[in-house]
Image: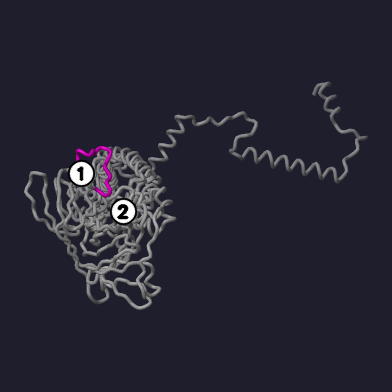
């Protein structure tokens, strides 16, 4: 050691005069050292980046965010969520009345729920299937299914064209395995195995490696084909519905016995035309409702329930065509060049005659009343504008009872839907109907803003009768102060016809059938692989191993592996030494 080094070494040695640290101080230093060592070890083991290491996480950017959004939208998880949301969105359409199906029930709902109806209408709950929010879910589901199915279809196509994978070297590790020893030639056994598997429609390939020859086979591609067919059929159904929405139309009209209908825009009570349909595209047919007939259950637990409905019409497919008599029934529509005329509902139209004080007829004919319950208690209004400019209008609103029963101290009520004892109960008004006021009015209700109710209560009538007229068929009531009269002439029936043209039906029906077939294939078929390997043994014999693996859960090919091993052993005249094990 050099003199300088020795001096440095001596210089660093503790001096005899140095004061040792106190025990408490020594303990504190020891604890700090232990804590520092623990922190250092934790930092070495942690995979998190250090705060001061200068690493910055790059942002996705616009393109990256779009790519991430597309991947999320086209995932099967999102497709299932959208399908569930579409099912939930359809629930209001099956609970609440829809304008496109039955506009009269929407009007009845408005009369019954005057507070809630406008709110529901603003939320488009009376037009669920034409609403913006339903269409948004529909379009997102359409895009999601396409983005999910197209890549899967391409991957499945490549998988069907590819050969099965080579046989594993250790077949004993597979869930199902069987083996036997034989003196037969290896190529002969492999050829027998390949022929048997091909006869069972396995896709088969032969190969050889250091462990010996092998046969690899696979079957059950139709399972994924059925799955893809099911989802592609769902896309077909969505396309068919979209075609019906854009190139179809549907409307409703109420026709009273003796009246007719011509397929023009102004003849409908409600009409929804697709974006690709114009008024000129409506088929030029017409019909007249000659008679409507309905029968009801007269006894038993289903008393008053409807049994048959028949609408007898004279139908003309064009203005120049000869009229034909047709009986339109429920689920038996009238069809004209792809346009269906369905019988949807019915009700009553009381026939009344209203005269003013000078005997001028202000109104004469049937007026549609809308049913409110199973016994066809129906509400409606009769408007009789004055024939003289500036004259006094008359109006009536109230109820029609097809089979009325009057009990002392109780309001009249109907006890059966058929018109056995028809009665009108009407409140009478005079004044201004505002029919020319410019504001839209319902034909089934009366605007009494500028009208005064007349005192038409009969003398001696009880409190239950109220200030209303009670008229049976053929009766006439005179209004007070010589303001006129009203006569209940008789009763006719009306029928509601829903008229629809849906070109998407030709797509939806085949797609629905294919969806069912695809679902059966997806649930009933199973994809599996079977391998056969032949290897040389030390005693000069050959070990034949058969093993299988299911590509789907719960479909282990135990029987096929066992049968294949037994068939090969029988061909080689050797018993199977290892039973199939799962």
* Mark carried by residue 264: 1
Is 112 on the left-hand or right-hand side of 193? right
CA distance separating discs 1 and 2: 20 Å
User: Of residues 354 and 178, which is closer to you in this image?
Assistant: 354
The image quadrant of residue 43 is top right
Indicate yes or no whether the magenta region holds residue 273.
yes
Q: Is residue 148 visible?
A: yes
Magenta region includes residue 453: no
Residue 254 at x, y percent in the picture:
24, 54
In front of the other: label 1 or label 2? Answer: 2
Say which quadrant the C terminus sits in: bottom left
Q: Does residue 533 appear anywhere in the picture?
A: no
Q: Residue at x 31, y 41 (%)?
A: 149
Mark 2, other Cα within 10 Å: few <14 / some 14–19 / many ≥20: some
Q: Quadrant of residue 145?
A: top left
Disc with the residue nearer the chain's start (1 vs 2): 1
Which residues are drawn in magenta?
Answer: 268-282
Quickly name the residue at label 2: 443
Figure check: 325 above or below 293: above
Q: Residue at x 19, y 65 (%)?
A: 294
Q: Residue 578: x, y in percent?
A: 30, 57
Q: Position of residue 250 (x, y in %)?
A: 25, 47
Q: Residue furthest left?
A: 322
Q: Can you give x and y, in whole percent of width and height, for residue 458 in the image? A: 35, 71
CB under 8 Å between discs 1 and 2? no
Along the horizontal axis of the image, is 506 left or right of 272?
left
Q: Looking at this view, is 321 or 582 the one in front?
A: 321
Q: Circle 1: is it few (<14), some (14-19), or many (20+) Cα within 10 Å?
A: some
Secondary structure of the residue carrying numbered label 2: loop
| Quadrant housing the N terminus | top right
* SS type, badge 1: loop
């Amino acid at each position: 050691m050099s003199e300088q080094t020795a001096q440095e070494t001596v210089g660093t040695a503790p001096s005899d005069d140095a004061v040792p640290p106190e025990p408490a101080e020594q303990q504190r230093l020891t604890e700090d050292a232990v804590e520092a060592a623990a922190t250092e070890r934790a930092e070495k083991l942690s995979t998190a980046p250090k705060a001061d290491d200068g690493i910055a996480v790059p942002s996705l950017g616009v393109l990256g965010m779009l790519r991430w959004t597309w991947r999320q939208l086209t995932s099967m998880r999102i497709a299932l969520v959208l399908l569930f949301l579409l099912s939930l969105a359809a629930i209001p359409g099956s609970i609440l009345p829809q304008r496109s199906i039955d506009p009269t029930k929407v009007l009845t709902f408005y009369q019954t729920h005057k507070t809630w109806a406008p709110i529901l209408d603003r939320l488009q709950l009376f037009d669920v299937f034409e609403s913006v929010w339903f269409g948004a879910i529909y379009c997102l589901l359409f895009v999601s299914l396409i983005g999910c199915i197209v890549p899967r279809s391409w991957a499945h196509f490549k998988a069907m064209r590819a050969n099965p994978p080579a046989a594993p070297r250790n077949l004993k590790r597979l869930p199902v395995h069987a083996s036997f020893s034989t003196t037969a030639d290896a190529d002969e056994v492999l050829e027998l195995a390949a022929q048997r598997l091909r006869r069972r429609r396995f896709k088969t390939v032969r190969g050889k490696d250091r462990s010996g020859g092998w046969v690899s086979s696979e079957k059950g591609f139709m399972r994924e084909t059925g799955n893809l067919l099911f989802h592609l059929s769902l896309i077909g159904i969505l396309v068919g519905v979209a075609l019906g929405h854009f190139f179809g139309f549907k409307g409703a009209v109420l026709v009273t016995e003796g009246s007719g209908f011509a397929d023009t825009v102004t003849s409908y009570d409600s009409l929804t035309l697709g974006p690709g349909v114009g008024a000129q595209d409506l088929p030029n047919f017409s019909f007249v409702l000659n008679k409507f007939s309905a029968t009801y259950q007269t006894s038993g637990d289903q008393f008053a329930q409807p049994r048959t409905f028949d609408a007898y019409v004279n139908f003309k497919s064009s203005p120049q065509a000869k009229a034909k008599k047709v009986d339109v029934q429920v689920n038996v529509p009238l069809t004209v060049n792809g346009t269906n005329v369905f019988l949807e509902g019915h009700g009553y139209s009381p026939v009344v005659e209203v005269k003013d004080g000078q005997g001028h007829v202000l109104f004469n004919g049937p007026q549609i009343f809308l049913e409110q319950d199973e016994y066809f208690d129906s509400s409606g209004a009769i408007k009789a504008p004055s024939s003289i400019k500036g004259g006094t209008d008359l109006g009536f609103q109230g109820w029609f009872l097809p089979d009325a029963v009057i009990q002392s101290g109780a309001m009249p009520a109907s006890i059966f839907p058929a018109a056995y004892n028809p009665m009108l109960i009407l409140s009478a008004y005079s004044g201004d109907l505002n029919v020319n006021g410019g504001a839209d009015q319902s034909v089934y209700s009366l605007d009494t803003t500028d009208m005064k109710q007349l005192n038409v209560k009969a003398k001696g009538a009880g409190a239950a009768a109220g200030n209303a007229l009670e008229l049976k068929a053929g009766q006439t009531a005179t209004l007070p102060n010589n303001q006129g009269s009203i006569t209940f002439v008789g009763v006719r029936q009306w029928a509601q016809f829903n008229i629809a043209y849906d070109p998407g039906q030709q797509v939806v029906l085949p797609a629905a059938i294919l969806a069912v077939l695809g679902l059966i294939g997806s649930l009933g078929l199973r994809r599996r692989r079977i391998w056969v390997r032949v290897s040389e043994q030390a005693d000069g014999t050959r070990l034949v191993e058969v093993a299988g693996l299911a590509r789907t859960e719960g479909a282990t090919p135990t029987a096929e592996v066992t049968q294949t091993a037994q068939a090969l052993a029988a061909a080689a005249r050797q018993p199977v030494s290892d039973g199939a094990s799962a």
